[in-house]
Image (cartoon, rainbow, N blue to C red):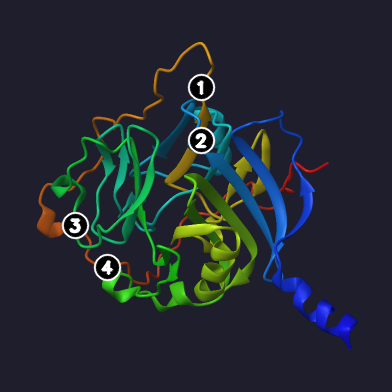
Amino acid sequence: MKKLLLSALFPLLAVPLAAAPMPKNSPVSYQRLVVNGVRTYVVTVDLNCKRISLVPQSSNGRYKSFRRFINESRPVAAINGTFFDPATATIICNLISGGKLLSEGRVGHSLRIDNQNKAQLVSTAGQPGRLLNLSQWAFGVSSGPTLLRSGNYVMAPRSEGFRDPGLLGIAPRSAIGITANNKLLLVSVRKPVRLVRLSWMMKKLGAKDALNLDGGSSTALYFDGKYVARPRRMLTNIVAVYLRPKETMKPIVAQPSAEAPLYDAAGVLPVAVVSSPVEAPLDPEADLPTEAPLQ
């Protein structure tokens, strides 16, 4: 009976399957785990290391393959970013880099990293980026629904501007989270799960605050030269992680291009993320095998 009980509880634990061959004491690491019975891919970024920079890479208004994003920006790790309009490829949430807006919206709350590399979940739903004081925002991404806040489960998608019922269904998922000791979790789940299960998984991984990212066919994760999860469609933005060389502490910042389509009036910003009959174009490399860095 005792053996049966242990067997029943085992899938609920976070069980390491393998570890990535990274240099000792690296501030960016990778694990493949089983969390609540689901295989999970996790990049952990130690923001206490001042050599770390997080940068949202945006191609607002056009599509790029995940591989092209990686080849052009050359991060050490990356995950797919926030939501966009499939018909126009326009990002509909706030993306912030170095105190500047790369895209603007009023949907979802935000994960902010300040100029001291301190991460924080900030209430921004309903607020266009131009109305925020961005002077201390080294990095910011709005997304959702919020999965965890101060260690508590949170699931209020409508109050954050999410109206698409498909978002609450079963799908592959991406999430971003913050631990109590200022570490960032970039999480990819290939197996389709519901948001509530994703929130349980993020808490099991040690997150105190966590946001759902644009998952489903956008789910993508990259680490140290390997594609851990490939998206099935083209993307418009990613969250990229950089480790600056020791000899320089100059921040890595993505600046908005001149043609970046910020809205002219806050009143015309999308108020809600709703279902769309239009699909983003497929990524031609979607069916290539993933290269999880575990060999």
Q: Are marks 2 and 3 in contact (CB under 8 Å)?
A: no
Q: Is residue 269 visible?
A: yes
Q: Is residue 176 left or right of residue 272?
A: right
Mark identifier at residue 127 = 3
First reached walking from the N terminus: tag 1 or tag 3 = 3
Amino acid bearing label 2: Val
Label 1 or label 4, whichever comes before in sequence order: 1
Q: Are marks 2 and 4 in contact (CB under 8 Å)?
A: no
**Which of the two marks, 1 or 3, is nearer to us in this view?**
1
Q: Is residue 97 left or right of residue 168?
A: left
In the image, what residue occupies the spot 79% across and 49% down?
A: 18
Residue 241's disc is 2
Q: Nearer the viewer, mark 1 or mark 4?
A: 1
In the rendered structure, find residue 244 and report the number of the disc placed on it.
1
Residue marked by disc 4: 272
Mark 4 surroundings within 10 Å by alpha-carbon count, few (fewer than 14), some (14 through 19), many (20 or more) = many
Q: Nearer the viewer, residue 42 or 64?
A: 42
Q: Residue at x 67, y 43 (%)?
A: 30
**Which of marks 3 and 4 precedes in the sequence?**
3
Give the CA separation, mark 2 to mark 3: 26 Å
Q: CA distance from mark 1 to mark 3?
A: 32 Å
Q: Position of residue 195 (x, y in %)?
A: 50, 72
Amino acid type at mark 3: Gln
Three-letter amino acid code of the residue under disc 1: Arg
